[in-house]
Image (spheres, grey):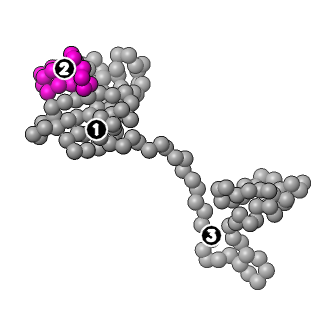
Amino acid sequence: MRWGLPGDPVPPCRNRAQVLAWYQCGRAAGARARVTETLVSGDRILVGLKVTGRPAAGAGDETDRWQVLTVRDGRVTVIAGFEERDEAAARAGLAPAPPARPSAMTWAAPRPRLADDRIELRLPEPADASVLHDYDLRPGGLDGSWVPLPGGTSLG
């Protein structure tokens, strides 16, 4: 068992007893960790953690940390700790996390169709943009209204 970054000439822990003692000291000092993510890639496991109660952090502060566990013959043989997920993912042989995308609203047409012989209620289409824009320019046109036009629609 070894705990440290690859190539570290003097890893913090060089055997099972040292690793367990390190965790025991942290727990006695009030540190706690909650697992937020686990991904397996071959003989490596990426573990995401929310750590609280660390001496350097204020009370109630959470810190994100990642560890990569290397497993050989059914036992953890190496633990490498990281402050950045992308570094940990690279060490584990995984792709970095995709960037967070803002959630987009999706609009669906009303069911059943809302219409009579004179009026039909439907969602606006890109072709409606110029008419809505002109209407908005009139006094009181679209006051307080929001129209869900598809992304990329030009108002020109």
Residue 55 is at least partly visible in this image:
yes
Image coordinates for residue 59, horizontal then vertical, percent: 40, 20
Instruction: Give whichever of discs 2 and 1 has the lower sequence position.
Output: 2
Three-letter code, disc 2 = Cys
Q: Which residues are magenta?
A: 1-23
Three-letter code, disc 3 = Ala
Say above or below: 49 vs 118: above
Say above or below: 150 vs 19: below
Q: Residue furthest front?
A: 7
The disc placed on residue 13 is: 2
Image coordinates for residue 11, horizontal then vertical, percent: 21, 19
Three-letter code, disc 1 = Ala
Instruction: Tell whether 38 sits left or right of 131.
Output: left
Magenta-colored stretch includes residue 69: no
Instruction: Tell whether 52 sits left or right of 118.
Output: left
Front in this rendered view, residue 6 or 66: 6
Q: Quadrant of the C terminus?
A: bottom right
Front in this rendered view, residue 137 or 154: 154
Image coordinates for residue 7, horizontal then vertical, percent: 24, 23
Q: Residue at x 40, y 19 (%)?
A: 57
Instruction: Give whichever of discs 2 and 3 has the lower sequence position.
Output: 2
Residue with the mark numbered 1: 92
Give the SS element for disc 1. Answer: helix
Residue with the mark numbered 3: 109
Q: Residue furthest right?
A: 139
Q: Closer to the camera: disc 2 or disc 3?
A: 2
Q: Closer to the camera: disc 3 or disc 1?
A: 1
Q: Residue furthest left?
A: 73
Instruction: Tell whether 129 sits left or right of 74.
Output: right
Give the SS element for disc 2. Answer: loop
